[in-house]
Image (spheres, helix red, strand yellow):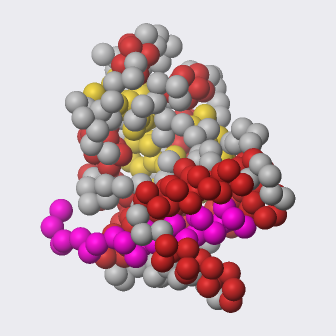
Amino acid sequence: MSAVPEASIVVPSYRGVSRLPALLNSLASQEDGTPPFEIIVVIDGAEDGSSELLEAEERLEVRSIQFSENRGRVAALNAGFNAARGDVLIRCDDDLVVPPGYAAAHIRAHEGQQPHGVVAPTRDVHAASPYARAYGEDAAARSLAHARSRPARELWRLWAASCSITRETWERIGPYDSRYQGYGWEDVDYGYRLHTAGIPIVLLNTALAEHRGPARSAQARALKAFEAGASRTIFRTIHPEAPVEEPLPGHGLWGAGVNVAARMLTSERAAARWGAVVDRALPIVPTAVGRKLTALAVEGSGLAGSRSSSTIGEEH
């Protein structure tokens, strides 16, 4: 094992053998003078060839942790961060492609006496498809613009796929919360815990990464929305004082439509079925109509998921 690196890049990965090569290629292309860093890939259960891929990697210092069963992203993140040796701990999801200055930018951002959290924005990259044309590309552009417009007091809401803290902060704040078992909000929860601990969060635009694994269909996007809605309810139960409002369908005819959709989508299976119907319609309807149909499926699924989530207990 080499000398202690300055940074550890923790990569949670589930069935990531097709995604990891692009990430590893980008990490192997970091600019000259980048301080030494290690990569820890946590393989979350399913063995799909990821272990062999990592064992064959000779350009980078890579370690892997293999779970015998799928335990979820929270468990993967906690295992990776606990095993890290660097002073700067960087989360980087396996479907990202990072710029040449990525590692150095994260490391430099933590220089100085004041502890803080660093969140780097990501940009969804879509292959051409009816879904991308109708909804995905527009949603990606709006999401990135919204992230960059957030005031400093709200940056905790952006804690997600590409972010970093110091080891000292990790030991102070503790691990990701294991009560989040589905998709989403375990990261927002961590950002909020940093915020309430008085640790400022900064946006690192110079480390903008490409997100190569966004939802590729209305069905996939509706499923994510349903799970994220349920996770949002968990967040609001854990942090009732947080400025995160109960999701509402909105006003007027659109709000009525979203509310009707939410009443129909009582399960993930129902959300998937509706999303599949929308996907079949997207190639034949005008783009504007396809955008509305997809938005209705996404917003209705998110609202349905928030309503379906049961109240969790108080114990970790």
Reply above or below: 101 against 116. above
Is 233 rendered above or below residue 75?
Answer: below
Q: Nearer the viewer, residue 299 or 150?
A: 299
Q: Nearer the viewer, residue 228 or 152?
A: 228
Please check the rendered image and state whether residue 116 is part of the magenta-colored stretch, yes or no. no
The image position of residue 274, as x and y in percent, is: 56, 60
Residue 145 is at least partly visible in this image: no
Q: Is residue 250 left or right of residue 283?
A: left
Q: Position of residue 231 (x, y in %)?
A: 39, 65
Q: From what the image shows, is residue 137 above or below residue 94?
A: below
Query: Which residue: 39% across, 23% down?
Result: 48
Q: Quadrant of the C terminus?
A: bottom left
Q: Which residues, given as a range, are shown in magenta?
A: 292-316
User: How many numbered discs sit on the rendered protein?
Assistant: 0
Q: Is residue 183 visible?
A: yes
Residue drawn where x is 50% and y is 48% of the image: 161
For image coordinates 34% across by 70% down, the residue present is: 309
Q: Is residue 288 left or right of residue 60?
A: right
Residue 67 location in percent, x, y?
25, 32
> In this view, which residue lies farthest toward the left?
315
Q: Name the one closer to the observer, 121 or 14.
A: 14
Q: Is residue 313 magenta?
A: yes
Judged by its main secondary structure, the magenta piece is helix
- Residue placed furthest toward the bottom: 252
Report whether 63 appears left or right of 68.
right
In the displayed structure, 267 sits above or below 66; it is below
State the image coordinates of residue 261 (x, y, percent, origin top left).
55, 74
At x 22% / y 30%, what residue is drawn?
A: 68
